[in-house]
Image (cartoon, grey):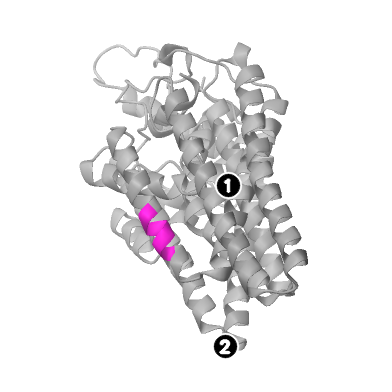
Amino acid sequence: MGVFKYSPVDFLFTCVGLVFLLLDIALDIWAAVSFFQEKAYVSLAVLMLFLVGSSVLVQAFSWLWYSYDDSDKLTKVEKCLSVGQLKLLHVLQLGIYIRHAGVVELSVCSIFSGLADISGDYAVYLNHDLSMLRLVETFSESSPQLVLMLTIILQRGELDPVTVLKAIGSASAIAFSVTTYHRSLRNFLPEKKQQPMTSSVVYFLWNLCLLSSRITALALFASVLPCFIFTHFICSWIVLFFFVWRSKTDFMDTPCGERLYRATVGLIWYFNWFNVVKGKTRFRTLLYHGYMLLDIVFLCSWWCWSKMTTQAPYFETVHYAIVTVVVVVGVYMLGLLLKMIYYKRYHPNHSKEELKGDASEKTRVGMGPTRKHEDKHGDEPDGVAFRTMALDIEADIEADLVTDSNEPSQPPPEVKRCNKRMRKLAENFYC
């Protein structure tokens, strides 16, 4: 019996996530080709910087997590690759797609086989890593891209179809990744204390308000001072990275990986709040949102002043600029109000021991079966193949648990599979 259950809703989120992935790739290619055809080489260079930088960052995390788990392979997709081939795919920026394929494989096994507990537990385990990788991609690619697209719209003063579609695609990717991340955290709650679906809706709305306000403020500032937006990012990231370092996080298994994680959290904090330590974070949250609110006011005020001094007629420009600033700041305040409602009505507080999984179990937690076996399924019907695959996985687990073949066989202990990385994030969020 597994620790987690893979529900049809989880399967739906997996399928939708795959659709968003393919759509985002298509829109990225379309946007890059459009910029090239328009000879907008600066915009093209910035877009490529976001795409390449985000891809390298996500592939680095993916490979580090494989190495932490001793390159354990839970799916047939992964088992057909050697460690060297898996590493090469990450170097070629293709490793993340192996994870997607593995999640889809186990998701289908969980839904259509008779052993949903086994393959479903593995599917949830892999999906936890994937949800965190999507979150990293969201704030290293989708959010900066949305700032870029909104900046182009503001500078041109017209709605170009490609730019608008890419902006909508980036916004959709942000919304989806935030929602799936919250669902992954909810998996660790005890069965009797599961949060209602309305909690995810409020969680999504609060993040939507905070992110839309922040991204709009950055786009307004970049539309009048495009060169200084990079200076603003570097200075803000240094400040945020310092506070992350002071928090003494312990998310990764190696010092080098932890430094990369802290630098990434500094990037995420540039757009939105992200819990990185356990315990009461009210003071840190208030300090962060106070800083963000002042920064948004500064960015919008600079844009407002620039508009008033460079455009005529004066009074119409002043009215338009002031209304824009008030709306952007007001949306951020609305997001803070929704966040307070969430923590007041929906957010459960649990001790570390109450959450599902046991991150202290090093032998089974975060470790997968490594026995390699041949593909014995041949041309069996799909339903039989899925069930046989699940039985093979179960056999691998039981074989790994046997310590002495000469001793009388004992009932295998319950296999507990828990993603220790995501469990740490759940502890930061719920404890």
Q: Residues within 10 Å of mark 1 (few under 14, many from 20)?
A: many
Residue range in magenta is 230-235
Work out whether 306 lies above or below 100: below
Work out whether 49 lies above or below 383: below
**Residue 406 showing in the rendered view:** yes
Quarter of the figure with the C terminus: top left
Secondary structure of the residue carrying tag 2 is loop
Q: Residues within 10 Å of mark 2 (few under 14, many from 20)?
A: few
Q: Is residue 232 magenta?
A: yes
At 56% from the left edge and 26% from the top edge, which residue is drawn? 187
At 28% from the left edge and 42% from the top edge, which residue is drawn? 258
Where is residue 361? Give x, y as percent: 32, 21
Q: Residue furthest right?
A: 316
Where is residue 298? Give x, y as percent: 52, 52
The answer to whether mark 1 and mark 2 are in CB contact below 8 A is no
Work out whether 256 lies above or below 29: above
Q: Does residue 347 appear left or right of residue 393 in this picture?
A: right
The residue labelled by disc 1 is: 104
**Mark positioned earlier in the residue sequence (1 or 2):** 2
The residue labelled by disc 2 is: 39
- Residue nearest the observer in this picture, 144 or 178: 144
Work out whether 168 lies above or below 38: above
- Residue nearest the observer in this picture, 121 or 16: 16
Report the mark closest to the observer, 1 or 2.
2
Tell how many labels: 2
At 66% from the left edge and 52% from the top edge, which residue is drawn? 325
Where is residue 278? Give x, y as percent: 39, 23
| Amino acid carrying mark 2 in the image | Lys
